[in-house]
Image (cartoon, coloured by chain):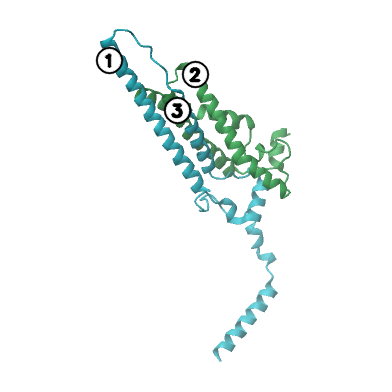
Chain colours: A cyan, B green
Amino acid sequence: MTLISKSITAFGSLLLAHACYSAQEHSALQSFRAATSAALTSTPTAATSLPIDIAIETVVAILVILIGLVLGTSPLRPIQWREWAGKIEREGEDGFKDNKGQVNRDYMGNPFDFIEGRPNFVDIRKQRKEFAEWVKSQGQQQK
Amino acid sequence: MPSQQELDLQISPLVQESLVHNSRTLHNLQSLTASLFGVGAGILGLESYSGFLFYLLFSLITTLLFYTLRIAPASISSSSSGTGASNKGGVLARYFRSPLDFWTAGLTNGLAGFILTWTLFYGLVRA
């Protein structure tokens, strides 16, 4: 995604730079022609406006860059607390990455994590059984 | 007795970080594109009202593009998974608090940058 947006933006910038250079050349040529024709024939030439192709190129370049930049924005996040928490629950860190694939700095994890770790709800018998098995396996390995 | 708005906030609370993140994303885009429009207006050699009209038109196009490329696809994918995104306020309410703010904030965000690059490129091209 980010490569697409970057290449579109780069292409648009190239077009815009070309349009800018063309417009500059056009105005320079215009002033040069006005100066020479005034010296030669002394008939004032009307200053022509920008050629239509440069104008079209400018507008197209702006639209292309616009699409590239919009595609390059980082994904939005839901503002409703319930949707936001549901998204974390469903997607975890994957839903909170920016375009470079890095998890955002202000991502603070599942808001329900503290519920999972409450001491009252720890299954102590299961943990004891697991510990006993672990001890047994350690003992077998040492023999 | 709390007002209706306070009650709504109590029932469906908002995430401040997401609000800030969304509006910052939009703000960054708009201030970046505003200076781009200035370049365009300078190249085209627009003057007075037509330049501001150009800015108005293109910032509306920016917001529209942002809406169609960023907000609409997300809402389509979420409505298929069954969350009630299309309750009151529609798709936009999922990401932004007030629709009016979303559509019009861009006009004031980038105006200074627009005028800066507009005058700069007008001067560069027509010098």
Q: Provide the secondary structure element on which disc 1 rests.
A: helix
Tell me if mark 1 has few (under 14), some (14-19) or many (20+) residues whose alpha carbon lies within 10 angstroms of its own: few
Whole-percent x and y of residue A61?
Answer: 47, 33
Whole-percent x and y of residue B62?
Answer: 55, 33
Q: Relative to B29, is A41 above or below?
A: above
Q: CA distance from mark 2 to mark 1?
A: 32 Å
Label of residue B55 in the image: none
- Amino acid at dot 1: Thr
Marks 1 and 3 on same chain? no
| Residue matched to label 3 | B40
Tell me if mark 3 has few (under 14), some (14-19) or many (20+) residues whose alpha carbon lies within 10 angstroms of its own: many
Label of residue B50 in the image: 2
Q: Earlier in the sequence, mark 2 or mark 3?
A: 3
Query: Residue under mark 3: which chain is it in?
Result: B
- Amino acid at dot 2: Ser
- The answer to whether marks 1 and 3 mark residues whose Cβ atoms lie closer than 8 Å is no
Label of residue A36 in the image: 1
Marks 2 and 3 on same chain? yes
Depth check, front residue: B48 or A52: A52
Q: CA distance from mark 1 to mark 3?
A: 30 Å
Whole-percent x and y of residue A38?
Answer: 29, 10
Query: Residue under mark 2: which chain is it in?
Result: B
